[in-house]
Amino acid sequence: MTGGSRVAILSDKSASSLGVHSSDRIRIKFGDREMIVIANIAEYYPKNRIGLYKETTSALGVNEDETVSVQLAPLPESLFNVRAKLRGERLREGDLVTIVKDVVEQHLSSAEIAAFLTALSINGLSASENEALSRAMVATGKTLSFGKDPILDKHSVGGIPGDKTSMLVVPIVAAAGYTIPKTSSRAITSPAGTADRVETLCPVNLGIDEIKTVVEKTGGCLVWGGALELAPADDLFIQVEYPLGIDPMLLPSILSKKKAMGATHVAVDIPTGMGAKIKTRTGAYTLASDFVDLGKRLGLTIQCALTFGDQPLGCGIGPALEAREALVTLMGGGPADLRDKAVSLAGMLFEMVGVENGQAKAEDMIDSGRAEAKLREIIAAQGGKPKVQPDDLPVGPEFAEVKSSSSGKVIYLSTDDIVRVAREAGAPKEKGAGLILHSKLGQTVHKDSVLFEIYAERSSKLSSALELANQLSPVVLTKKPAEKMVLDQVPEKFAHEKEFSIDR
Amino acid sequence: MTGGSRVAILSDKSASSLGVHSSDRIRIKFGDREMIVIANIAEYYPKNRIGLYKETTSALGVNEDETVSVQLAPLPESLFNVRAKLRGERLREGDLVTIVKDVVEQHLSSAEIAAFLTALSINGLSASENEALSRAMVATGKTLSFGKDPILDKHSVGGIPGDKTSMLVVPIVAAAGYTIPKTSSRAITSPAGTADRVETLCPVNLGIDEIKTVVEKTGGCLVWGGALELAPADDLFIQVEYPLGIDPMLLPSILSKKKAMGATHVAVDIPTGMGAKIKTRTGAYTLASDFVDLGKRLGLTIQCALTFGDQPLGCGIGPALEAREALVTLMGGGPADLRDKAVSLAGMLFEMVGVENGQAKAEDMIDSGRAEAKLREIIAAQGGKPKVQPDDLPVGPEFAEVKSSSSGKVIYLSTDDIVRVAREAGAPKEKGAGLILHSKLGQTVHKDSVLFEIYAERSSKLSSALELANQLSPVVLTKKPAEKMVLDQVPEKFAHEKEFSIDR
């Protein structure tokens, strides 16, 4: 609960006798201990009582029905820095450090954090603000060191469904003898995050010491980063950003975590296109150069790949379906676009650390079976079954085909709609749920061709996903747009879709 | 507690098994009742328990240890409108209505409200956004009707200490036979709000029916508006704005409350100058024309007065000291600036409803004793002692003089510093605390002349106020600036002072 433990509840009568208004800070004293908390005023709260969270009462060593002394305290310095940002002022490194520290120590309320993030979202961040925020987020969290150089890493800014590239890049890179300690997120708004996919093969919720052991043994890992407290400020920022649909701290958020993991060389994937978070080439190039610049400031070597983002990657969408596909691709099969993306990104990383013809090396890791063997090693080290076969991963059991009602070429695949259908089917919560695409951009389909299959763990989910699929028709054939030139009518309201993505 | 009752606490484990993230909405069902609340995820909360506020459990009719069913619910429409505003989009009337409604019904969290207000503060509001917000705030609150026309009102955008003009304008206008139902605020950041001042004479915390009775009997009232739920959305907005130091909704906030009170003609006082909220003439003219325009859109006749805002009004500062001064001025004495401001504003109101030479009429109301008599009538109707004399109002009992250490003319009076000293002395909480100014702009003072007196209810407060006064030296004589041309040093940090004012 954001800022939860640093909040105290007072009745309006107590508050007014103390001269305290909602969001004012109060100093609570008990014996020789004291604590400053944020006042929350509740109309019907009993007078002369104060409501404290367990964290606060234990810090003060006070029990229920004991008496504490309460007085108005000054507002924190960080809040004045937030106010300066709201007025459009530039903040210096020290100012941003006070904010990040007070976010982590819960001295700022979620409303105050939201205002700060909104101002950043509207006004943007300067290069030095990005740097200061990144450094402050690293400094307020845990860090890892493997005592080696280089430490490689890979990150996707995300946004296209079915992107299971990390599950291939990590074993390819580690198979070549490099160190790549990869942390990933779970899905928030997408049908699967890398952590959700990998979790169908082995545990991903490892502690920092366990991660060190796995990486020292295998050269790589595929773990969930969410509970590692690598950059706890960022986790709190994301919590506040999520309902607001804003993401102003994208760069410091990503790079602070890489830095905390000890990375020295990072390949950043920027999917670009209608189906991705970044819609235009211009936007992608700007973001890429911002990444490279911020990397330099933080002592990280960064290269970015602008990748095709008009449609999902591969065919499987949903945790288990994607894990199956990743495994098949490492075993030499799988869809061409997934293999191409994985060897390109792994190859880029190889070349960043001095390997010539990196992509050929990456291909070789797959073709020789070494990447597959490495993934199995990592699965074993993380506590999974190393001999797992793609078909061992349970999908469905409910499934249905969605067929084309006409013939033509696929000219548009709505990734937003595909995400909605996959989530309606139960992904990412139900790991066997999702979609398999049978038709992708440019492909010719006939009447009654299967466009995609839907998998679900429950028949009720299957039918609601099917219904949504029929309503949305995410796969668009050549003829359709010509028949329907009006995209929407104004002032008829645009549908508000939940298309904001903050998965990392 | 903002959004308090519509929040539910879940453990991270329960949340993840429901696919719920912090700030997601959840639907809670018990029997045939249901309610949508905002999910707050707490790490150490017991699994399979849900923490609900009393308001929620009574609405659902559920008792502790009974079982409710919980599922993920869609985000409210209003939140998508908030997001659109964060992206810089224009909102239509209907969009703003959903936001205001959901603020009142607590369907938006304080973080979401803060983001909305921050975006408004940075991007500004269009005339139609101001109108839509005002109307929505009136529509979601209580309204009064006196079945008469005209209904007069007066408002100050505030910011200068010692401004007790309303305590004179109301009886002057009512004495002339007009209706002027005035609601006022209490101080938040100032040493006294009108409600605090009047409360030294009579109760101000009246209900809507009591207000109607007082106004029908006397033609006027001087009551606290804070608990009347006239525009409850505004009260919630102000709570969130207060720690952030922003005030984007100034116009709709003020005019929605006037509209709810049934006003038809409003005189708006815009103190302009170094000591006021509005620092420049340009700013004041812009605000004035925005007031007039928004008034037209809402069917209110508005005239604005740009008033001298470089120093406090009158000499008394602090609830009782100001009430004394108001009473003295209605009795024919008092400082000239206070009398001038009161008869000017009352005169403006008279002319707005067709009276010729309004100021003369206002002067006459004072000189004839009718305004004084009317104030005593209002005091009696609100439950106070009508025969109260200025000296009956307790001030002090601790007091001290602050003397000049040199001679010269007063060229600057820091209102911010005067506010700080008065508050340090105990105002507004301690009603007898405050300041009496003995020197104002342009006045010649000699070495050891009394610059001001400080009053306090407790000697500890008096000494800390005295200490602060010596440190701040709020009264500046001609010689001083010439001696000290460097105002501040950069990069030495500017002092962050709590100079933001949101008192209405």
Image (tube, coloured by chain):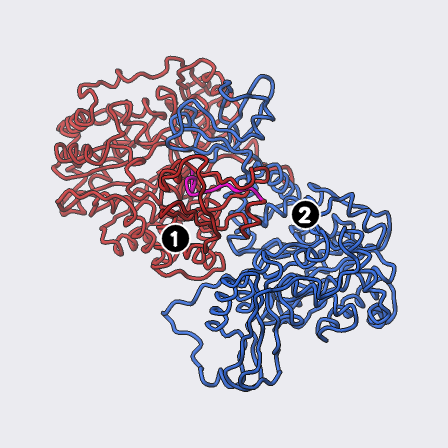
Chain colours: A blue, B red
Residue B502: x percent and y percent?
A: 40, 39
| Residue occupying the point 53% across, 51% down | B18
Which mark, by number, is residue A132? 2
Residue B11 included in the magenta stretch of the image: yes
Residue A194: x percent and y percent?
A: 68, 58
B136 to the left or right of B466? left
Which quadrant is home to the C terminus of chain B? top left
Q: Amino acid at mark 2?
A: Ala
Residue A198: x percent and y percent?
A: 70, 57
Which region is colored magenta?
B1-12
Q: Are marks 1 and 2 on the same chain?
A: no
Residue A307 included in the magenta stretch of the image: no
Residue B4: x percent and y percent?
A: 43, 39
Tell me, yes or no, if residue A382 can be seen here: yes
Which mark, by number, is residue B99? 1
Q: Quadrant of residue A430?
A: bottom right
A145 to the left or right of A85? right
